[in-house]
Amino acid sequence: MALRLRKSKVSAPPGACPLSECMAMLRGAWAPNVIWYLSGGPRRFSELRRDIPRISARVLSARLHDLVERGVLVRIETDTSPPSVEYQLTDLGLELMPAIEAIAHVGAKLKERNRFRQRA
Amino acid sequence: MALRLRKSKVSAPPGACPLSECMAMLRGAWAPNVIWYLSGGPRRFSELRRDIPRISARVLSARLHDLVERGVLVRIETDTSPPSVEYQLTDLGLELMPAIEAIAHVGAKLKERNRFRQRA
DNA sequence: CTGTATCCAAACCGATACTG
DNA sequence: CAGTATCGGTTTGGATACAG
């Protein structure tokens, strides 16, 4: 029983399927949005809350921690006065952008399609 | 118990964020994989179970229903003998492929990166 | 401002057994 | 083969209140 405790329990099977590696980063309903809004540059906690109005503070906090732990984001505490905290994409985070953008692009298409179908 | 199962409660806010439209389709840990394996052509229930070994019949069934309901897949019952059932991507399903492929591509990159980092 | 704590509900999952 | 039924467990999330 010398099993090491794993800090992150990946619900998706690791490596079992070709998409798991990336999907592990996009866990939860909100992670992609967080990354999306950080792609425009560093942002603060409260800004992200405004960007993503329906996310609760608890979940935003959880996602942020998760993404930092996975190396997708960094938390930058600026020691000015008043001190501020910003989150920023890492290189790894930037590597996710093509997937995020593809998702957003498809989403935009679906939205148009919906409008179209509703008129028809 | 005349309680009917709610068909779909979308927990992600519809239209609130630019990624929600597409993410709603990729809900759950397995939906992207199901779509991925259907991109090679129609497949049967049991084939998908083999493609995605760690998915349970219950969940595969649920995802399949969900995706059919969302218009991503169609269930095709062939009336031959023996009769067979196949699932196939719809046009809407095909529209998701760029996102799925981007996710897979990023995943492959991450995998390489991991191997690289472990050697270093 | 940047979170954490608590509570609770909903979504998701695997294992197992079972049906037509 | 193509699922469904049941059970119990995990994960994710919202609301609210609160802390440094």
Image: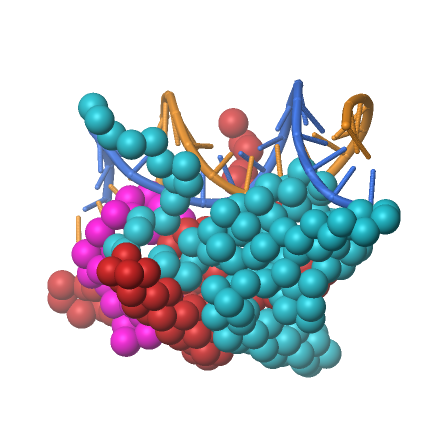
Chain colours: A cyan, B red, C blue, D orange
Above or below, B8 against D16 in this view is below
Residue B28 in percent (x, y) is at 46, 51
* Point 86% across, 48% down: residue: A81
| Part of the protein shown in magenta | B35-64
Depicted A82 relative to depicted B119: above or below: above
Q: What residue sits 54% from the left and 50% below the top?
A: A68
Q: Judge by depth and name the residue closer to the eye, A70 or B58.
A: A70
Q: Quadrant of the N terminus of chain A?
A: top left
- Relative to B98, residue B12 above or below: above
Q: Position of residue C20 (x, y in %)?
A: 23, 44
Residue closest to the far left: B82
The C terminus of chain A appears in which quarter of the rendering?
A: bottom right
- Residue B88, can we see it? no
* Foreground residue among B96 and B80: B96
**Residue at the spot x=50%, y=47% of the render?**
A69
Say if the magenta span includes residue B112.
no
Residue A24 in view (yes/no): yes
- Examine the rendered structure and indicate whether residue B91 appears above or below residue A94: below
Left or right of A115, for residue B26 = left
Q: Position of residue A70 (x, y in %)?
A: 47, 51
Give the prevailing secondary structure in the magenta stretch.
helix
Is residue B93 rendered to the left or right of residue D4? right
Task: Describe residue B49's horizontal placement relative to residue A88 as left or right.
Answer: left
| A74 and A29: which is toward the camera | A74
Residue at 52% x, 27% y is: B1
Q: Where is residue B73, by image quadrant?
A: bottom left
Instruction: Check residue B56 for magenta coloring.
Output: yes
